[in-house]
Image: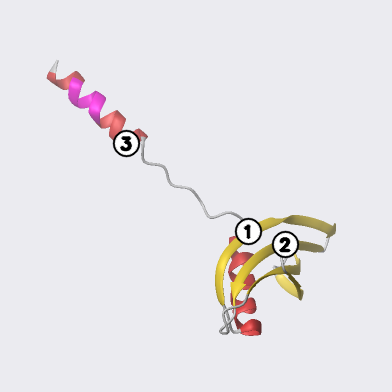
């Protein structure tokens, strides 16, 4: 009975531990945050991954929305679009678009 109880507890403990890999967009999200901080010299308050679009076989686009607070205390949103070659992960362009929502 003791062996069964120990086995059951071991299974319970190890079955609750899960390791998740970072999502594919994590690399691009980090770049979006870093480039936005450089451009606006502001604090990132919130971050949202909008999605990936395949534009051509050699060009994909990741879109993010970041909510930032400037040094003056103003808060606003910035949409960041990163276009890149999905085969080589080479960045082709980064575009920023401000929004008040």
Q: Are marks 1 and 3 in contact (CB under 8 Å)?
A: no
Residue at image location 64% in from the left, 71% down from the top: 32
- Tell me the CA gap for discs 1 and 3: 32 Å
Classify 10 Å Cα crowding around label 1: few (below 14), some (14-19), many (20 and above).
few
N-terminal-most mark, 1 or 3: 3
Identify the image quadrant of residue 58. Answer: bottom right
Q: Nearer the viewer, mark 2 or mark 3?
A: 2
What range is drawn magenta here? Answer: 5-9
Against 3, residue 81 (above or below) is below
Q: Residue at x 72, y 72 (%)?
A: 90
Q: Residue at (60%, 72%) from the top-left corner?
A: 68
Q: What percent of the width, then of the height, locates residue 65?
A: 68, 63
Q: Which mark is residue 18?
A: none
Question: Is 72 included in the stretch rendered in magenta?
Answer: no
* Prevalent SS, magenta region: helix
Q: Is residue 76 above or below residue 1?
A: below
Return the disc, 2 or 3, that comes first in the chain's sequence.
3
Q: Is residue 71 left or right of residue 78?
A: left
Q: Which numbered circle lies on residue 48?
A: 1
Please tell me whether mark 2 sits on a helix, a strand or a loop.
strand
User: According to the image, label 2 marks what residue?
Assistant: 62
Q: Nearer the viewer, residue 73 or 85?
A: 73
- 7 in the magenta segment: yes
Residue 84 rendering spot, x and y as whole percentages = 75, 68
* Dot 3 crowding, Cα within 10 Å, few <14, some 14–19, many 20+: few
């Amino acid at each position: 009975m003791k062996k069964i109880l120990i086995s059951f507890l071991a299974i319970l403990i190890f079955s609750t531990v899960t390791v998740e890999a970072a999502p594919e967009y994590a690399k691009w999200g980090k770049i979006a945050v870093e480039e936005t901080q450089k451009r606006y010299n502001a604090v990132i308050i919130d971050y949202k991954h909008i999605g990936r679009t395949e534009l051509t076989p050699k060009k994909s686009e990741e879109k993010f929305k970041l909510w930032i607070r400037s040094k003056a205390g103003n808060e606003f949103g910035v949409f960041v679009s990163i276009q890149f070659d999905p085969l080589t992960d080479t960045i082709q362009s980064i575009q920023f678009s401000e929004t008040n929502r």
